[in-house]
Image: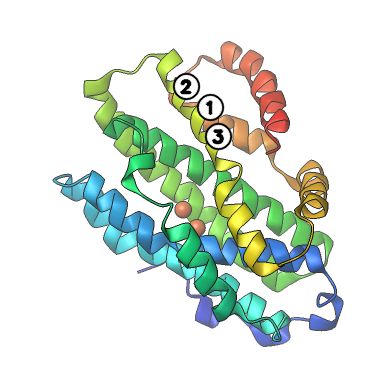
Amino acid sequence: MPKWNYRTIDYDTIDKSALTENDFLFTLVTIASFIEITSDIYEKNLVTYYEGDETLTGWLTNVWEPEEIQHGKALRKYVTTVWPHFDWDGAYAKFREAYGALCTIDEFQPTRGREMLARMVVETGTATFYKALSRYAESLEEPILMQIANHISKDEVYHYDMFEEGFVRYNEEERLSRADIMKVIYARLKEASDEDIAIAFKNISPGRSREAFQKDVKKFAKRYYPYNMSVKMLLKPLKLNHYVEKATASTVEKALQVLGI
Ligand SMILES: [Fe+2]
Ligand SMILES: [Fe+2]
């Protein structure tokens, strides 16, 4: 059972008038809702990939997937509450058709340990994104979105911890070097930047320029993205000592900015 329940959130108290014109917020939250609610496809692929590892597959099915789906439902309800004229179901159906076809095991890492690392990168991305979203909501004086984003961010940190446990377990055999670990992290970061967001954007705002949205995302990241948190999470599997970590952190932070994260 998820640790919180989106049904207990007071969506009725949202001051919609202050938000309906905020196109950027609409796009951001809708994209997130689409991606989260599609986690069932990932769950199936991961369970196939880790077949035989009952600790992990049991957790994926009974905990991870229900939590991710709840993220999607909580955000969907937010979108349909604040922007009731948007055809969420129609747009999502198109997104799912296009995006679902791309979610295959072929894009997984070649070993189980490496794939655990890739999952840690993904959870870092979501944990930090929702942290940024919560800060943005705070700046908009929107307590309900803040509450939702905080709940989700905490879940994503917990997912990261669980995938880290899996990584440590598999790495006892795989014994990846720091260079190997860096390669996987970097490759996954680069890959994370686009596909799903591009497809979601096309189905949410057909005919609108994605460039303008990207510009707003950059501004949003600059103001609200928790770079420190992101760098700490990304570097953790390297087990650097304190001094090396400090020296490496600023390089990684710059790299994240170059990658547009
Ligand atoms: Fe999520
Ligand atoms: Fe997650």
User: In the image, is 4 to the left or to the right of 49?
Assistant: right
Q: Which mark is residue 186?
A: 1
Give the CA separation, mark 3 to mark 1: 5 Å
Spot occupied by residue 74 in the image (x, y as percentages of width and height): 55, 73
What's the amino acid at mark 1?
Answer: Tyr
Give the residue at x 50% y 16%. Answer: 240
* Label 2 Cα crowd, 10 Å radius (few <14 / some 14-19 / many 20+): few
* Label 3 Cα crowd, 10 Å radius (few <14 / some 14-19 / many 20+): many
* Of the pair 119 and 6, the residue shown nearer to us: 119
Q: Quadrant of residue 249?
A: top right
Q: Quadrant of the C terminus?
A: top right
Instruction: Label 3, secondary structure: give it.
Output: helix
Q: Which mark is residue 183?
A: 2
Residue 204 can be seen in this image: yes
- Which residue is the extreme one toward the left? 52
What's the amino acid at mark 2?
Answer: Lys
Q: Are marks 1 and 2 in contact (CB under 8 Å)?
A: yes
Spot occupied by residue 193 in the image (x, y as percentages of width and height): 61, 42
Spot occupied by residue 182 in the image (x, y as percentages of width and height): 48, 21
From this view, report whether residue 8 is shown above or below residue 181.
Answer: below
Give the CA separation, mark 1 to mark 2: 5 Å
Residue that numbered label 3 is attached to? 189
Q: Quadrant of the N terminus?
A: bottom left
What's the amino acid at mark 3?
Answer: Leu
Instruction: Label 2, secondary structure: give it.
Output: helix
Q: Quadrant of residue 160?
A: top left
* Of the pair 10 and 175, the residue shown nearer to us: 175
